[in-house]
Amino acid sequence: MTENSTLQQQPRQAPPRNGLGTAGFVLGLLGLVASPIPFVGVVAWPLVVLGLILSATGLARVRAGKATNRGLAVAGIVVSVLGLVVSVLWVVVIGKAVSDVQDQASQHHTITYQVSGDAKAVNIDYSTFEAHTILITTEQSASVPWTKTVEATGFLEGAQFAVTAGPDGGSVTCKVVVDGKDAKTATAAGPGAVASCTGF
């Protein structure tokens, strides 16, 4: 039997099947990169899960002698797990933020507006709250001292409180108390002077 016939009888060795391990690494890496990005991180979930599955399958092929890219398959598992951890953390953070917003939106507040000073008459603009809507109420030529208490539910952003001294001048001080705690104070003096406690 010749040497050529001996070579022909030997079975050809199958090429390594490295595709799954490589694909798992690529998907896991893409998922890890995308996972910390707000909103874009949503696509990281399927990427890292699929990357983990493919990388694990690729590693199984390596152990069975059907693939040779052990390092890439292991790296795919690592980056996929890291991406999965980051994605889970984002879900926790976003869930906490949504919960906090919902709590603030339903929180009840008692707001007390106070005006003091030696001005004889002042004009007062202050916010009232109705069904999550902020309304501006004005009182002309109000006597000092002056106090008003209103109730609010939800966010207080955009609320206003300003006191304007009359033409006779004098000093005016505005003060806002929210839920029993001093929130803002301002003082102005002179004809037409404005003490603003807006932004509390």
Image: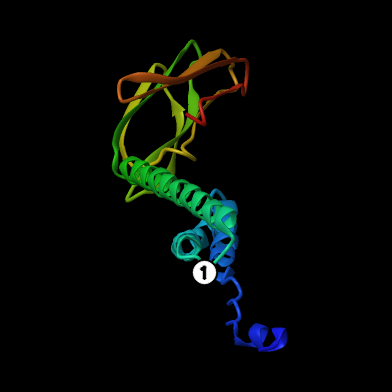
Q: Left of 22 or right of it: where is 139? A: left
Q: Quadrant of residue 16?
A: bottom right
Vertical position of residue 129 compared to residue 65: above or below: above
Vertical position of residue 54 compared to residue 196: above or below: below
Q: Nearer the viewer, residue 168 or 60?
A: 60
Q: Please report the residue visible at 49 percent of the width from the left and 40 percent of the height from the top.
A: 158
Q: Colour scheme of this structure image?
A: rainbow
Point out residue 116 in the picture as x, y percentages from the top left corner: 44, 14
Q: Please report the residue visible at 49 percent of the width from the left and 47 percent of the height from the top.
A: 82
Q: Quadrant of residue 182?
A: top left
Circle 1 residue: 66
Q: Nearer the viewer, residue 24 or 33?
A: 24
Q: How many marks?
A: 1
Q: Amino acid at mark 1?
A: Lys
Q: Nearer the viewer, residue 110 or 106?
A: 106
Q: Left of 115 or right of it: where is 31? A: right
Q: Please report the residue visible at 54 percent of the width from the left and 48 percent of the height from the top.
A: 36
Point out residue 183 in the picture as x, y percentages from the top left corner: 43, 22
Point out residue 77 in the picture as x, y percentages from the top left corner: 49, 54
In the rendered image, which quarter contains the N terminus?
Answer: bottom right
Q: Nearer the viewer, residue 104 or 153?
A: 104
Point out residue 133 in the picture as x, y percentages from the top left corner: 39, 49
- In this view, the residue farthest toward the top is 118
Q: Left of 134 or right of it: where is 151? A: left
Label 1 crowding class (10 Å Cα cut-off): few <14, some 14-19, many 20+? some
**SS assignment at label 1:** loop
